[in-house]
């Protein structure tokens, strides 16, 4: 087995009519001449917004914006990877896939299969050990935490006996090879004593993928000897930061959202309360891979980390990671216990269930944490509490939210609403002076002396300014091309159109005006890039271009042009700040060009995503106007761009990690 051929992928798509496939999951009715509609399987709704186009062989939901071809539908509905979805549909249609016979890949694939067999047998051994007389101590430990047989069986818990070679001998007796056990991270080798078990005298938590395959294990000590928790090492089939504990059970639950907790026992604590829609990262900070795994299943996450400094910081970091992946995030803060497991044992299931209903947005969570500290820490004075609360509110970008929270603080501290509001805005003004990136929301009146006017909107991204600044200090960067090798593209199973797009000169081209936001920033970029290609762009010259272009645009503004220009002062300040950061690093020209290439890749990726979003909006408008064929073309283009962007992102992440 190896890479699936393009012909096989096309054959799978042709053999699996999207209407037939989707109808296995969704009740479809014909509401227009070209499309069928039904209730979306990916989010809750009462009015059908999920459409399937038999002619275009694509689906699209107007509610959650998920869409694509039949392979994408199976990926989403069955929580499968792209190759897994192809094999799923191939089995459904009785198609034998053509796969390249790469000898190295084939050897790796066979080793992975043997490692999975070893891990599966290990899981059965650990479970049997938990049920045996040797597992009495472990069962008692679990029973003290309210974890009985039904629950530990559902999650596949086990026990690693105290013998250092018990697992090794048991698997050897089943003809599992030493290499398979090593590839699965189950054993280690000592020059003196030979092979020995990685886990011993620990409660075992199996880490599984969405299909139920065991990938690795976590082990919890039941004595005070050694570290409390250890996890399987990186192996041929397990990669830290890519998996979640409780994923299989969460995908099988009916939860509209998922809880994100810190550890194994926290997952089980919520499962005891009837909330199997709970997952946990595996002893690491939440990663982008894990966030995307969650995004494939739900749109909303409620974060419930440990109630200590480390847990609170992890909550906020995880929230930002999830938000970057497009998920809606809420935070939960338990009062009176460190974690859900402790809370459940102290206060019981009913009270825990009630507490889980109280969720916060990011600012509300930070204020709740601060208030909790103020109540429990004797060294925090009332003035310190008020001062820190005002600082937090000054960071809240939404004016309505600031007003709501400010009113609550005023009532709590017995202050006037006006005084609190004015103090928050004063602090926001100070923040903007110290940091030019702190922007006044568009439409809010600026507080500068003299004539009051609307604050300028940004209409640019910081990464655009970074690229222009780096061009100014190294004109050679204007010739840097995006690195997208045929080999890296070929390692992903994508359609011929997407492969051709990623291989095109357009995708790999050096920096150009189309990499910038339309309007003044694109005009600035066009002139700056032209001068850089002629090796005459300087930092001072870049400042001059900014002033000239924005001055011209301001003249148009006076004539009631629709486009308001960015604030030149902010751009100048940002250029200088970023230049100082680069100058301090004392980078070589080669390193500057390497960093520039990375920044350009990230920028182009965001441009593609933005373009896909605009195409989707256009398609929705065309659909409403009855131009369904044109809408279908737009959906297809958007899906292709999204797939290209996702593939490009994975290639970049692979290069950054290597």
Image (spheres, rainbow, N blue to C red):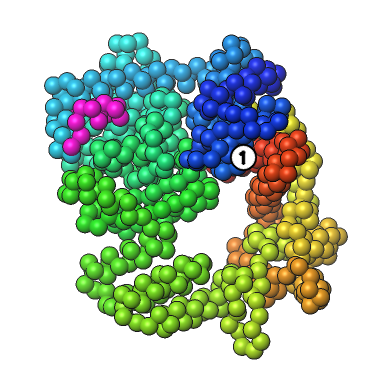
- The answer to whether 80 appears left or right of 318 in the picture is right
Q: Residue at x 59, y 14 (%)?
A: 93
Quarter of the image for residue 543 reads bottom right
Q: Which residue is mark 1?
A: 646
Rendered residue at 36%/66% (across/down): 367
Quadrant of the snapshot with the C terminus: top right
Q: Is residue 389 above or below residue 156?
A: below
Secondary structure found at label 1: helix
Residue 186 visible at all: yes
Does residue 494 sit above or below 292 in this rendering? above
Q: Is residue 331 left or right of residue 20?
A: left
**From this viewpoint, is residue 289 visible?**
no
Residue 159 painted magenta: yes
* Residue 415 lies in the magenta-colored region: no
Nearest to the observer: residue 534 or residue 364: 364
Indicate the position of residue 114 as horizontal and vertical percent values: 43, 17
379 sits to left or right of 260: left
Residue occupying the far bottom of the picture: 450
Give the x, y percent position of residue 360.
Answer: 38, 58
| Quarter holding residue 65 | top right
Q: Position of residue 214 (x, y in %)?
A: 38, 25
**Which residue is located at x 64 percent, y 84 percent?**
452
> Which range of residues does the magenta coloring cover?
146-163
For the N terminus, give its image quadrant.
top right
Q: Nearer the viewer, residue 216 or 454?
A: 454
Crowding around mark 1 (Cα neighbors within 10 Å: few <14, some 14 to 19, many 20+) is some
Which residue is at a point 41% across and 56% down the rendered structure image? 316
């Amino acid at each position: 087995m190896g890479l699936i051929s393009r012909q096989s992928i096309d054959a799978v798509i042709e053999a699996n009519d999207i209407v037939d496939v989707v109808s296995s999951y969704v009740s479809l009715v014909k509401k227009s001449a070209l499309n069928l509609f039904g209730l979306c399987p990916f989010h809750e709704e009462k009015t059908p917004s999920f459409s399937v186009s038999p002619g275009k062989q694509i689906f699209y939901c107007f509610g959650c914006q998920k869409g694509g071809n039949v392979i994408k539908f199976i990926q989403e509905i069955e929580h499968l990877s792209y190759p897994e979805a192809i094999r799923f549909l191939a089995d459904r249609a009785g198609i034998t896939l053509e796969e390249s016979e790469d000898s190295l890949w084939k050897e790796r694939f066979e080793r992975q299969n043997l490692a999975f067999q070893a891990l599966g047998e290990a899981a059965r051994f650990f479970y049997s050990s938990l049920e045996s007389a040797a597992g009495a101590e472990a069962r008692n430990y679990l029973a003290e935490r309210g974890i009985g047989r039904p629950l530990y069986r559902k999650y596949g818990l086990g026990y690693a006996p105290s013998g250092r070679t018990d697992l090794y001998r048991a698997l050897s007796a089943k003809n599992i090879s030493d290499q398979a056990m090593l590839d699965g991270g189950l054993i280690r080798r000592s020059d003196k004593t030979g092979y020995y078990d990685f886990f011993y005298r620990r409660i075992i938590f199996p880490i599984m993928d969405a299909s139920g395959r065991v990938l690795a294990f976590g082990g919890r000590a039941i004595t005070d000897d050694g570290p409390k928790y250890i996890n399987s090492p990186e192996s041929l089939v397990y990669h830290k930061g890519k998996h979640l504990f409780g994923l299989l059970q969460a995908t099988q639950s009916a939860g509209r959202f998922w809880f994100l907790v810190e550890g194994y026992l926290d997952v089980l604590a919520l499962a005891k309360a009837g909330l199997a829609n709970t997952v946990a990262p595996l002893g690491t900070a939440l990663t982008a891979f894990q966030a995307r795994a969650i995004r494939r299943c739900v749109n909303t996450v409620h974060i419930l980390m440990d109630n200590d400094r480390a847990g609170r910081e992890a909550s906020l970091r995880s929230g930002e990671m999830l938000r970057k992946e497009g998920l809606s995030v809420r935070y939960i803060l338990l009062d009176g216990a460190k974690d859900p497991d402790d809370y459940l044992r102290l206060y019981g299931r009913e009270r825990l269930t009630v507490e889980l209903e109280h969720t916060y947005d990011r600012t509300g969570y930070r204020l709740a944490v601060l208030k909790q500290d103020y109540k429990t820490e004797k060294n925090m004075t009332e003035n310190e509490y008020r001062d820190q609360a005002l600082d937090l509110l000054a960071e809240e970008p939404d004016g309505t939210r600031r007003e709501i929270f400010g009113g609550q603080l005023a009532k709590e501290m017995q202050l006037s609403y006006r005084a609190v509001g004015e103090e928050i805005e004063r602090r926001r003004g100070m923040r903007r002076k110290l940091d030019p990136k702190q922007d006044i929301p568009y439409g809010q009146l600026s507080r500068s002396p003299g004539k009051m006017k609307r604050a300028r909107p940004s209409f640019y991204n910081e990464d655009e300014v970074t690229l222009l600044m780096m061009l100014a200090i190294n004109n050679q960067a204007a010739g840097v091309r995006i690195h997208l090798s045929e080999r890296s593209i070929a390692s992903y199973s994508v359609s011929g159109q997407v492969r051709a797009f990623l291989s095109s000169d357009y995708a790999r081209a050096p920096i150009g005006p189309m990499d910038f936001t339309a309007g003044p920033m694109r005009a600035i970029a066009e002139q700056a890039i032209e001068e850089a290609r002629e090796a005459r762009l300087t930092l001072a010259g870049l400042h001059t271009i900014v002033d000239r272009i924005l001055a011209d645009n301001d003249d148009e503004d006076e004539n009631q042009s629709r486009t308001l220009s960015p604030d030149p002062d902010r751009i100048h300040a940002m250029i200088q700040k970023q230049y100082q950061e680069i100058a301090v690093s004392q980078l070589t020209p080669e390193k500057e060009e390497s960093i520039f290439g990375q920044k350009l890749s990230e920028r182009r990726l965001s441009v593609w995503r933005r373009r896909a979003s605009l195409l989707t909006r256009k398609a929705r408008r065309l659909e409403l106007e009855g131009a369904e064929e044109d809408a279908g073309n737009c959906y297809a283009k958007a899906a292709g761009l999204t797939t290209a962007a996702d593939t490009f992102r994975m290639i970049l992440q692979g290069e950054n990690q290597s």
